[in-house]
Image (cartoon, helix red, strand yellow):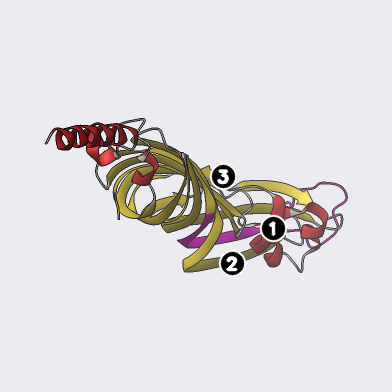
Amino acid sequence: MRWLLVAVGLMASVWAAAAQEFELPTLRGSQAFAPNAPDCCNLWGGFYAGGQVGFGVTSADFSTTTQDLVAHELRQLTLEAAQSVSTWQVLGKAHPSSTAYGFFVGYNVPWESLILGLEANYNRTNFSASAPMSPLFIATSDGSHAYNVNLSGTASMNITDVLTLRARAGYVMGNFLPFATFGVAVGRADLARTATVTGLQDPTPPPDPLACDPAASPPCVPFLFNESDKRSHAFIYGWAIGGGLEVMVMPHVFLRAEYEAVAFSPIWNIVALTQTARFGAGFKF
C-alpha cells in the first residue's frame, strides 16, 4: 500500500508538470478577444461576406467631350483646319455627390500577422453630372472668308453601378485589421452629349476684317451644324485604390469603415473620378 501511494504521488506530480508545459489554449479559457492571443490571425482567415452603405463625390471633366463632334460637323469647312474650332472649350467640370449601397464578398489568407486576400465589391450609385456650359461667340477667318461663329454644347454622365475586384493586404492588431486595397473597376453609365455650331460666313474674301458684316453685299451666308450622341447602360472601366479598418466585434462578425477612389478611363473624352466613404458589416464563415 505504501508503494502504491508513492507511485500515485509521482504520477500526479508528473501529470501536473506536463500540463503546465503543454497546456492548450482551451484550458486557459477563450482568448478570441485577447490582443496577443497566438491564434488571433485565425479570426480573419477564410471566406467572408457583408453589406455596406456610403456617400461619395465624383469629379467629371467634360472640357473636351464635344471636340470630335465639332470636328466632324466642320470637316468640309477650311475654318476648322485654320482655326481648330473643335478645340474651343465650352464645357467645364461637374462635382455631383451620391449615396451608395451594396455588398462585398471575399477570401482572406493569413500569413502570421499578415492577411492577404481578394474581394469583389459592388455598389449601386447615382452620380449624375451635367456639364456647365459657357457658349462662345468669336469673329474669325480662315484666310479667305470671314466668320461669326457661335459654339455651344451639352453633356451629361450618370454612373449607376460600380463593381471592383480588389487585392487586399492587412495587418492583424488583435481584433483590429487595418488594410489597403488595389484593383480593377467596371461601371455602368448613361451618357449624352450635343454640339451646335452656328454663324455667318462672308461669301467673298474680305479686304481685312475678321468679322462677317451682316449688312454686307452680297449678304453673309448663315450656317448651322448640330450633332448628338446618347448611350444607355454603357460599360466604363478603370482602376480602384483604397484602404480602411475592420474590427471583430463578435465571433465571426466584424464591422468595416473604408475609403475607395475609382478612376475610370475616358469615354467620349469624359474623365471621371469617384471617391466614396463606406461603412459596412460582415460575417466570416
The single residue placed furthest to the left in the displayed view is 1
CA–CA distance in space, label 1 to label 2:
19 Å
CA–CA distance in space, label 1 to label 3:
26 Å
Q: Is 198 included in the stretch rendered in magenta?
A: yes
Mark 3 and mark 2 residues within 8 Å of each other at the beta carbon: no
Nearer-N-terminus badge (1/2): 1
Residue flagged by tag 2: what amino acid is it? Glu
Mark 1 and mark 3 residues within 8 Å of each other at the beta carbon: no
Mark 1 and mark 2 residues within 8 Å of each other at the beta carbon: no
Residue flagged by tag 3: what amino acid is it? Gly
Q: Which residue is mark 2?
A: 227
Between 198 and 232, which is closer to the camera in this rendering? 232
Query: How many dots with numbers?
Result: 3
In the rendered image, the vertical position of residue 30 relative to residue 82, given as above or below:
above
> Label for residue 92?
3
Classify residue 125 as left or right of residue 141. Answer: left
Quadrant in which residue 161 is drawn: bottom left
